[in-house]
Image (tube, rainbow, N blue to C red):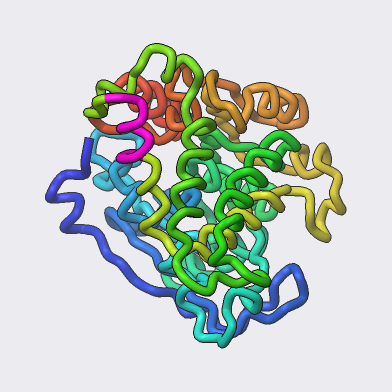
Amino acid sequence: MPASDASRARSDMGVFQAGDVVLQSGRTFRGMTLVYKTFGALNADRSNVILYPTSYSAQHADIEFMVSEGGALDPSKYFIVIANLFGNGLSSSPSNTPWPDVGSRYPDVTYCDAVHVQRRMLVELWGIERVALVYGWSMGAMQAYHWAALFPEAVERIAVVCGAARCAPHNRVFIEGVAHALMADSAYRDGVFTERPVRGLRAMGRVYAGWALSQTFYREEMWRGLGASSLEDYLVTAWETTFARRDPADLLAQLRTWQAGDISANSLYGGDLAKALGAIRARVLLMPGDHDLYFQVDDNRAELAHLRHAELAPIPSVWGHRAGNPHPIHQPEDRTFIDTRVKALLAA
């Protein structure tokens, strides 16, 4: 369900000027900017805040359909802030960073870097010290996990939808395949794209298609319900074009962020994942897709043993990873499953 006209009338888009930010790598990112969009109104005691970070290659317009009156992310009840992750082409990214030879000069930005800037934004723009919920899917879910581990006193709840506390080895292998399909294009030379990698973007989309959806999705030819006349038609129309709308250097930058994802990879926890999970005070809702090929249910099940207040609720869906970002027309059951459990989390 899309947000109502009334909800959209209460939305606002802006840019947080973070200034010069010292990253985990030790490099200084000069003039760092974070683009955001808000829905709803902040209440008097600032207790109705939901932070909703973006996922891989997504911009706020791609995920705001989950914000709707009557849904879990209800702008008539909550002040919802969508934070665009660095590297997505809106917030600071290789494509909009004014440095020469940007492909080799753009620094690696971690989730840790990202959530620290997000927290600064909430405090400096709205005086928000505590959030009711951090909700995220995929890379957004990994940001939610980082919020809970790095700022345990500031987070009441997190909803981790098809995500994990650490990028698993098999997940890293998946990302390697995606990245190298893009970098295999002859336009990629010495770490820089010298022209648009048309063939690389098409290849990247086809590799991704085999991972984002389950074997059952393809076996049952569910792509026919999406308007495709054949499997080849589906791959061309739905996947060869998926990443072509983004800058290739941006895509690689976010893949590096994704691969390095680990809530314990910082000075607080020194790589001790169990310690990082045990430090989380928030109520945690883990919602992996039961057919997800790269954020596995077993990853979340292993995390569950170290969390204080957590529930594991796999999404029963053959849509694989895409179950966590349900299409408003084609996946009503997935949307209902997510909304029902996130509403219960918010009521806890």
In the current view of this chain or complex, which residue is farthest to the front? 186
Residue drawn at x 75%, y 37% is 169
Hey, which residue is sitting farthest left in the picture?
5
User: In this view of the protein, which residue sits in the foreground, 160 or 157?
Assistant: 160
In the rendered image, the vertical position of residue 245 relative to residue 158, given as above or below: below
The residue located at (31%, 54%) in the rendering is: 61
Instruction: State the image coordinates of residue 222 (x, y, percent, origin top left).
Output: 33, 19
Decide whether residue 233 is among the magenta residues: yes
- Image quadrant for the N terminus? top left
Residue nearer the viewer, 127 or 298: 298
Residue 31 vs residue 26: left or right? left
In percent of width and height, residue 237 lies at 30, 40
Q: Is residue 47 visible?
A: no
Q: Which residues are magenta?
A: 230-238
Write down the quadrant of residue 164 in the picture: top right
- Comparing 4 with 133, the one in front is 4
